[in-house]
Amino acid sequence: MLRFTHSFVVKLSLTAVFTSLVSVLTFLIRIPVPATSGYINFGDTLIFISALLFGRFVGGVAGGVGSAIADVVGYPVFAPFTLIIKGLEGFLTGQIKDGKSLRRDILACIVGGGVMIIGYLIAEAYILMLGVPTALVEVPGNFSQVLVGGLIGIPLVQVVRRKIAFITKS
């Protein structure tokens, strides 16, 4: 028999909320890359925030499922790759973070973001057979997604952690 504990319900709720937020942010702001038929978006910001605050499960599901849902509308050929690539991005970011160290948060975003950049490069070049030169066109855009996601996500996470720490001490 399945037992719903308080922590399970909270984690499930956070996962649903962040999955929705990633999907909406990814869907709302799309900058097309005609060479690959892909696009640049700002969903990585919320992937990093969810993973850094709530860990690998929330980050992985929100990143993979949320981004794939956004791909289904307009870019469906990318959805299966996105599910795996963005899921790994969120999972690894959440796995590496330790919840205390700014350096560890930065490392987590670099590793998670690096996996995303390399994952799309491989998927586009070899699986979708666009070739390496064509796939390389999207690397600067993917890099900018990671950079913007980290520059916005990491400071926001630091502020939220300080606020939570202050509230729990009161």
Image: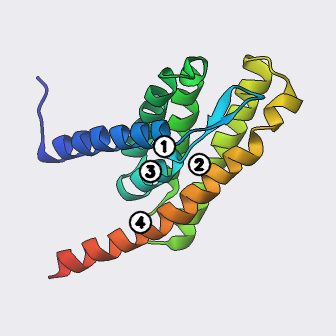
Lower position in the chain sequence, tag 1 or tag 3: 3
Identified at 11% across, 23% down, the residue is 1
135 in relation to 42, above or below: above
Do residues under tags 4 and 2 come within 8 Å of each other at their CB atoms? no
Q: Amino acid at mark 1?
A: Phe
Task: Tell me, for residue 157, which label it has, or none.
Answer: 4
Marks 1/4: CA–CA distance: 16 Å
Q: CA distance from mark 1 to mark 3?
A: 13 Å
Q: Are marks 1 and 2 in contact (CB under 8 Å)?
A: yes
N-terminal of the pair, mark 4 or mark 2, is: 2
Q: Are circles 3 and 2 on residues that touch, CB within 8 Å?
A: no
SS for callout 3: helix
Distance, label 3 to label 4, CA atoms, is 10 Å
Q: Callout 2: 10 Å neighbours few (<14), some, many (20+)?
A: many
Q: Amino acid at mark 2?
A: Gly
What residue does disc 1 label? 91
Horizontal and vertical percent position of residue 112? 59, 48
Q: Provide the residue designation for mark 3.
A: 46
Cα separation, mark 3 vs mark 2, equals 13 Å
Along the polypeptide, which appears first: circle 3 or circle 2? 3
Q: Which mark is residue 112?
A: 2
